[in-house]
Amino acid sequence: MRRFKLADQVIEETASDFRDAIANAYQRRIRPFCLCKEDGLAMYIAQVGDQYIVKRMPLSGGGHNPACPSFEAPDELSGLGGLVGSAIQIDPESGMSALKVGFSLTKLGTRGGSVRGEGGLDSVSHETKKLSLRSLLQYLWHYAELTVWTSGWAGKRHWWNVRWHLFEASRQMIVKGGMLSDVLFVPEPFRVSDKLAIEQRRATALSPALPPRSGPRKLLILLGEVKDFWPTRTGHRLIVKHMPDFPLLLDESLHRRLRARFENEIALWGADQDSHLIAIMTFGLTPVGLAAIEEMALMVVSKNWIPYESVYEKKLVDTIANVRERSVKGLRYNLSADMPTAAATLLTHPQPVGLYIVPPSADGAYERALGELIASRPEFDAWIWRTAEGEMPPLPSL
């Protein structure tokens, strides 16, 4: 359990007066220090609604003790390392992330429909790196700590708390000069008994996407779980869970390219009944009230809402789901498939372990890059599964 130093006071996270102490420190601008290490590490206090939360300073997660909940595997072990400082600018005082994105939140005309990263990278190839829609989805998932897992949480992660964590994460992000939370819609759990009230709240939240009389149309971002794709006379419609009465339209071209670009994600989702397919999209409302998707990306997650990209990662995710120690799933973001990264990290004490999966197609260049990546973080042990050589080896002794 964490202990914090607030000026001359040392207080445990479980203390009965902890909330009052943190609120008082926030008002007095006192910076807390996490005492997971002897000298203490600077933290900051974020106000979320009427709550006050102690959070680690940006880019400081690797400095905490591996047993501390604030510890985080370094960005270099995932695709995030190549984006922090370029596509992701973090304010060290407030913890706010200013994001450079490669998609539009306005639209001229009525035609749309594109799939970011058709070439396979989900990136924008210019001097300044930008986040694709899929990379934004992954960063939200990471920031909301939905990549973190321990066996003690089994059966306790549901859509209502996934939604809450995603929305709170969006309140710490700036996109195109505005708060991401102002343009992000994540559907609330659907209840028949609350149907009319839910529809009213949704209509209010989506009203900024109504078309103006003139000028560009404003687009919103929707993040939700896919229930199904249904054919229509002129294309397809996406049915999002918890929004069964609110179809989103895809023209035939967008649907075809979506199926091609995210063929693997759709296949993995179809192969496992317990997995979820997460969609993120920009969309606007037409003059007659229909929701039309402009751009879209997909990500498959396990029954515990942990992302994975192959059957090999799925086996690893399912295995570490039963481990008592915390684990953090690694994400690729804009990183290409031929670059190695940690599939996950086990936050064991005293030495955390990076878990690496080598795909069957890996060549000598991949192996050399993997060796360099492992050598760059000597404070991490390494576990490697070379999938071409057989079944997954046992995890390190815990």
Image: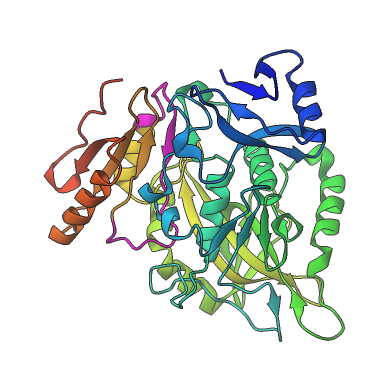
Query: Which residue does the image show at 61% across and 64% down from the upper left?
Result: 281
Q: Does residue 157 belong to the magenta stretch?
A: no
Q: Nearer the viewer, residue 230 or 371?
A: 371
| Magenta stretch bounds | 319-339
Task: Indicate the quadrant where residue 100 lies.
Answer: bottom right
Residue 152 in percent (x, y) is at 50, 21
- Can residue 303 be seen here? The reply is no
Query: Which residue does the image show at 77% across and 29% down from the upper left?
Result: 25
**Residue 361 horizontal side relative to residue 113, left or right:** left
- The quarter of the rendered structure image containing the N terminus is top right
- The quarter of the rendered structure image containing the C terminus is top left
* Position above or below: 44 against 267: above
* Position above or below: 21 against 261: above
Q: Nearer the viewer, residue 250 or 151?
A: 151
Q: Nearer the viewer, residue 380 or 4?
A: 4
Residue 319 in percent (x, y) is at 34, 31
Q: Nearer the viewer, residue 163 or 191?
A: 163
Residue 16 in percent (x, y) is at 74, 13
Residue 104 in percent (x, y) is at 64, 74
Q: Main secondary structure of the magenta part?
A: loop
**Residue 258 horizontal side relative to residue 9, left or right:** left
